[in-house]
Image (cartoon, rainbow, N blue to C red):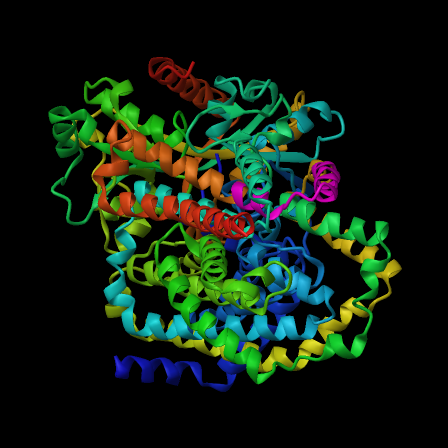
Amino acid sequence: MLKFSRRSFVATAAAVAMSIFSSAVPAHAADIDKLHFLIPGGAGGGWDGTARGTGEALTKSGIVGSASFENMSGGGGGKAIGYLIENAASSHGTLMVNSTPIVIRSLVGRFPYNFRDLTMIAGTIGDYAAFVVHKDSPLNSFKDLVTAYKANPRKVAIGGGSVPGGMDHLVAAMAMQAAGEDPTKVKYIPYDAGGKAMAALLSGEIQALSTGFSEAIALANAGEVKIIGMTGPERNDAYEDAPTLKEQGYDAEFVNWRGFFGAPNLPEAKANAYRAAIAKMYDTPEWEAVRQRNGWVNIHNPGEKFVTFLSDQEAIIKDLMTKLGFL
Amino acid sequence: MLEGIMLGLETAFTFQNLLLVVAGCLIGTLIGMLPGLGPMSIIAIMIPVAINIGDPAAALILLAGVYYGAIFGGSTSSILINAPGVAGTVATAFDGYPLARQGKAGKALTIAAISSFSGGTIGAILLLIFAPALSSVALLFHSAEYFALMIVGLSAIAAFAGTGQVAKALMMTVAGLMLATVGESALFNAPRFTMGISDLQSGFSFVTLAMALFALPEALFLILDPKRGEATSNSEAIKDLRITREEAKKIAPVIARQSIQGFLIGVMPGAGATIASFLGYAVERNIAKGEEQEEFGKGSIKGLAAPEAANNAACTGSFVPLLTLGIPGSGTTAILLGALVALNVNPGPRLMIDNPSIFWAVIISMYIGNFVLLILNLPLIPYIAKLLTIPRNYLIPFILFFTMIGAYIGQNNATELLLLIGLGIAATILRFADYPLAPLLIGFILGGMMENNFARAVNLTDGISFMYERPMTLALLVIGALLIIVPACRKRLSKIRKGGIADGD
């Protein structure tokens, strides 16, 4: 689920910045001596940016003494998960970053494992999903999109940056389902890069684009699109003008979370120490700087809350994917 | 507009900014020579440094220097050791490497530098004048047209085959198309042909395949055939970078044509430098006459100048959708977009109005980056070219080392090395059997894009009616068909004519 988008490139920039400048070790004693981050994808992706950004905030604020990073790509993230499970005993100092795709890819059986095989440390940040249309589009709200869709489902193409059955598609299907439409009829057109999907929107090839909220904000700020709906529970102060789907009467909420996992059977004391360190991080100015630079939204789900959150998300996605025929 | 240009010049010509562009060019050239580290990764590496500068104009000037340096550096590894690090320089190796093998490495590098410079400069001028007007052109292409454009690219493949090798070239193209289907495509939520190997889920990586097909067999050939290395041992000739007046006359029209064609292709988001360089090469080969046409693939200076001018012009062209619409047309411009956003500059229709100094500084900085690069690198060429005078028993391990680093560095995955060696051995066997390998790589590069665009077009129109309903798609498909039929007919006609004379007398 590699997304070649604005989001990840900002993350790249940040990530590489950190790999160069993160050697500064604070003087006072840290809560955790050292921490190793396992990144299931190559340098420059969203996972990479999250791990390195979190590592930067933790070390600069002195919560963690030193952080190291390891990129292990392969199998769309499966290789790193397998590695962490096979080397559980020697990986107590390791945190692996992951996000919504671990749920989706486990469901479709792409991985022989799922998130329950790992120790769930905490969900840390998230990004809502959003729908955007061309600034000159006659559609002004998600309701308009639904109306157009009802008139002729084959004439309304919704694009996105993920494969069919991937996140952007699921969000589109979820929203249409909330509007009482058959989610399998949604004409979803996948693009392999955010830029290409955007070009398709501007050229009129697709009528709407399903994308991440932070990316939608960047596009709206450039003055080319209107955000007609986002999947948060309420309007977000990052872009107050964007209406939620909920306030338009469509009960669809979705958040693409990112968070951290430990090795299976990680001792409880260790897991709790990591959770405490992450909780402490939110109040530091160092984290605020990283968060703002990347346009992330704080969505903190530590320990048990993370387990419930993931199980809920899994149930919703499973239901939707079954309806869509992917399971 | 003149006001804007002055504004841009004023911003660019400060001591600090000139220093930055020089530093950027040097860094870009040096890192860019490593296969596997293309402009995209190098810019990604330099972005934090650029962001630390704080001033968006200065940051962009640094990145433009890095960008052009990296492109030039990439051509260097294509020419000297047949190891194209990015798809855009694959076509450079077709004639650049044979030239280097004939002991004309210095000349080849000079032609590459001059063609790149001209392509970039002509591109920058076109950008300066037409950027706002071209923004709508960038949106003319839908998936259907991109599909047809890929077909045109594939149909030009016969141009890469030597005489009597058309069938072999087509077989290799099909093999490339097949390799492109391995892994998860952007369109089906299922891995294909991975044989259960999880490392193949994301498909073969371009760099691994390019190293395995081009650089590795070459290194093995140097071992198996000791005589091959000897032709390149005359160090005086290698360092010689002079171009005769006659040669300059030959390549000037090629550069002019390909700069314009490349720029226009680059304006389409998603087509980019790769297509521009392949089509540039194919077009020039097709319009070359007799003996000159025969020379293509064997060290033709025209065959080197065409892709180099085209890919640089296309890179510049890809700034049109970036600056006017905020759409990154290539991986590199996507990275640059990330840098711009991090610097609180939002490219798009409003950029020219809100931040005219940045808009113009970008364009001017591209021109300066190009220019500084030429001045810096021409004196360096003799030293870079001297690399080939390293004795064979040191040079071969050196090539092998960089080949492996190139394959490993992007993915951090040791399986890439096994793939590299396996594919490299297969490629060496194919070379022994005299199969051309370039069509395989081209098929691989274009295959994925072609499939994705085809599937999108089918999905959008619920069928294949787009092939005849959209006039531009139809026109491109017709061009593709002509590219295959015309040379074949011409060959048959000339054969019949020759045969007729023999029979009649």
Q: Nearer the viewer, residue B190 or B45?
A: B190
Predominant secondary structure in magenta?
helix
Could you tell whether B136 is left or right of B221 in the image?
A: left
Q: Residue at x 48, y 67 (%)?
A: B309
Residue stretch rendered in magenta on the structure: B419-443
Magenta span contains residue B424: yes
Q: Nearer the viewer, residue A190 or A28?
A: A190
Q: Nearer the viewer, residue A314 or A79?
A: A79
Residue B103 position within the rendered picture, expressed as x and y whole percent measured from the top left: 74, 70
Q: Residue at x 45, y 45 (%)?
A: B155
Magenta span contains residue B235: no
Residue B221 position within the rendered picture, expressed as x and y whole percent measured from the top left: 79, 50
Q: Residue at x 64, y 82 (%)?
A: B242
Q: Quadrant of residue A277?
A: top right
Residue A140 position within the rendered picture, expressed as x and y whole percent measured from the top left: 13, 41
A266 is higher (above) or lower (below) than B366: above
For the question of whether residue B171 can be seen, the reply is: yes
Which quarter of the image is occupied by the C terminus of chain A?
A: top left
Q: Quadrant of residue B408?
A: top right
A59 is higher (above) or lower (below) than A132: below
Q: Nearer the viewer, residue A254 or B142?
A: B142
For the question of whether residue A214 can be seen, the reply is: no
B173 is higher (above) or lower (below) than B193: below
Q: Quadrant of residue B390?
A: bottom right
Residue B432 position within the rendered picture, expressed as x and y whole percent measured from the top left: 75, 43
B18 is higher (above) or lower (below) than B111: below
Q: Residue at x 67, y 59 (%)?
A: B34
